[in-house]
Amino acid sequence: MAESSTRRIAHLDMDAFYASVELLRYPDLRGRPVVIGGGAERPSGGRYARLGDYVGRGVITTATYEARALGVHSAMGMMKAARLAPDAVLLPVDFPAYRHYSRLFKAAVAAIAPHIEDRGIDEIYIDLTALPQDSGTLGRQLKQAVREATGLVCSIGISPNKLLSKIASDLDKPDGLTLIGPGDLERRIWPLPVSKVNGIGPKATRRLQDMGIETIAQLAAAAPDRLQDAFGLGMARWLLDVAHGIDDRPVVRESEPRSISRETTFERDLHVVRDRALLSGIFRELCEQLSQDLARKRVRGATVGIKLRFDDFRIVTRDLTLDEAVGDPDAIHRAAGQCLKRVTLDRRLRLLGVRVSKLEPLDGGGAALRPIQLSLY
């Protein structure tokens, strides 16, 4: 593991966060399969809605571990979930409550270790390097502080970097504390499937599997030229680094956005032909709003993408990387339009979004430095 042994980074992940908050409110549901989402109504008179009785097009926000054991997971359509777990309890989402408990657990952590990178409502990175206690002691203190502040449990991974800590926090859920030290890369990380690495998505996983690479250990032993031929130079270098546990990203208290997007969900599903004029106007407006967002943040981006959700809940994304970074609405609209042409529009649309990534700061018009193509072999 090519990292400095003096660096200690923790990843803290709240266990089944939304569902766990709901169980504080309804403790009699502990140990039962519970699903959150779908526009359900709050229980009244001690009676709970049953997932099998749900009719509609909603999707699951999250579920308890008991429901997950039945095959139910987040982003699954409610009707499909109802077939898998008809007797599960259905509860509505309550984002104000989740944000309240998010603030509580982060404040509890900050009282012990203030160097925190906020990664969302239910997870944070923590730099423990400057603290005198050993990692095990700190991990236990953090877990206890979170439990006392919220009544909830979390899982923590501690290692020399963010990459390994993110993987580690998932290894012993729920209520886990996992330390990754010398020898643990080979013992605990390498046997895992490559999909466990944050950043290796379904497409890359399938491509690696086609190459006979199933585990992180196999990725670490892969020939660099094969990876470069399949993924390109930059991605190949990154894959080899992560397989060997290399990650020098710092814990940053205020992270810059990696992308900026605008999207809208329609009040009714729109037909790509009969509602063409309406869709065109929405598309143009999203590009103009996105351009204004970029200008406010004084950035521009070289990759423009779109996101579509169809009436069957299928999500399609397309991206186009340009020769130069853009920020004006016409350029964004042209590039997003090229992405749109690569999608088969054979169903009604529920959502349309436009995104700009590979951001760079505006520098008064100066040319950005361009990467030089090198080789791994």
Image: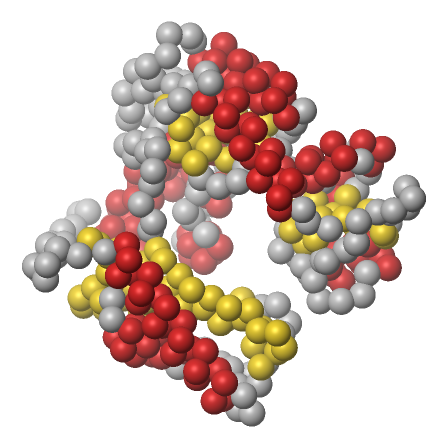
Where is the N terminus found, in terms of image quarters? top left
Colouring scheme, one of rainbow, by chain, secondary structure, one colour: secondary structure
On the image, which quarter does residue 245 sit in?
top left
Picture coordinates of residue 141, whole percent (x, y): 53, 13
Name the side, left or right, on which 153 lies relative to 360: right
Q: Is residue 189 above or below residue 43?
A: above
The residue drawn where x is 42% and y is 30% is 125
Q: Residue at x 58, y 81 (%)?
A: 270
Q: Left or right of 66: which side holds 236? A: left
Residue 350 in percent (x, y) is at 58, 73
Q: Is residue 26 above or below residue 263?
A: above
241 is higher (above) or lower (below) than 74: above
Q: Is residue 264 above or below residue 70?
A: below
> Relative to the observer, which residue lies in front, 92 or 64?
92
Asked if residue 223 shows in the view, the reply is no
- Residue 121 seen in the current view: yes
Q: Residue at (34%, 72%) from the top-left corner?
A: 288
